[in-house]
């Protein structure tokens, strides 16, 4: 069992994806946290974490999302001014 102590709380966990993601976030390795999320099928979490990793990581993660999800409804959700940025290149 792994025990992580971080400021005022202690986290007890086994080495699973969630604890690996948490460890990556704690040390500021947002790119690793995003990769772990994507590999475990947690794209929503990956997109949220990527937003903390700066514009380059956010854009890279969004690109990965749009490459994996080519659903037509996404064209409806994005305003026309933004949709060209994503769908013209996929």
Image (cartoon, rainbow, N blue to C red):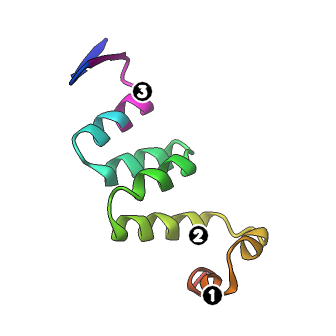
For mark 3, what is the residue?
16
Disc 3 and disc 2: Cα gap in Å?
A: 27 Å
Q: Nearer the viewer, mark 1 or mark 3?
A: 1
Disc 1 and disc 2: Cα gap in Å?
A: 19 Å
Disc 1 and disc 3: Cα gap in Å?
A: 40 Å
Instruction: Give the left or right position of residue 30, taking residue 17 as reference.
Output: left
Instruction: Give the left or right position of residue 54, taking residue 39 as reference.
Output: left
Quarter of the figure with the C terminus: bottom right
Q: How many dots with numbers? A: 3
Q: Please tell me whether mark 2 sits on a helix, a strand or a loop.
A: helix
Q: Where in the figure is residue 62, as x and y percent of width and height?
A: 51, 67
Question: Which residue: 42% across, 65% down?
Answer: 58
Is the residue under label 3 in contact with that under label 1 (CB below 8 Å)? no
Question: Which residue: 61% across, 63% down?
Answer: 68
Q: Please tell me whether mark 3 sits on a helix, a strand or a loop.
A: loop
Toward the front, the furthest residue is 8
For mark 2, what is the residue?
67
Q: Please tell me whether mark 1 sits on a helix, a strand or a loop.
A: helix
Residue 20 among magenta residues: yes
Toward the top, the furthest residue is 1
Q: Nearer the viewer, mark 1 or mark 2?
A: 1
Q: Is residue 52 above or below residue 60?
A: above
Residue 30 among magenta residues: no
Q: Is residue 16 above or below residue 74?
A: above
- Residue 81's disc number: 1
Disc on the earlier residue, 1 or 2? 2
Q: Where in the figure is residue 78, as x and y percent of width and height?
A: 68, 75
- Which quarter of the figure has residue 56? bottom left
Disc on the earlier residue, 3 or 2? 3
Q: Where in the figure is residue 61, as x and y percent of width and height?
A: 46, 63
Magenta residues, start to end: 9-21
Q: Where in the figure is residue 4, as x and y percent of width and height?
A: 25, 21
């Amino acid at each position: 069992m792994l025990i992580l102590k971080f400021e005022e709380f202690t986290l007890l966990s086994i080495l699973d994806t969630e604890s690996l993601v948490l460890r990556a976030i704690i040390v500021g390795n947002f790119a690793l946290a995003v990769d772990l999320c994507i590999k475990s099928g947690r794209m929503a979490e990956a997109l949220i974490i990527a937003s903390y990793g700066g514009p380059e990581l956010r854009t890279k993660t969004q690109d990965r999302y749009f490459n994996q999800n080519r659903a037509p409804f996404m064209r409806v959700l994005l305003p026309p001014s933004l949709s060209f940025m994503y769908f013209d290149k996929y």
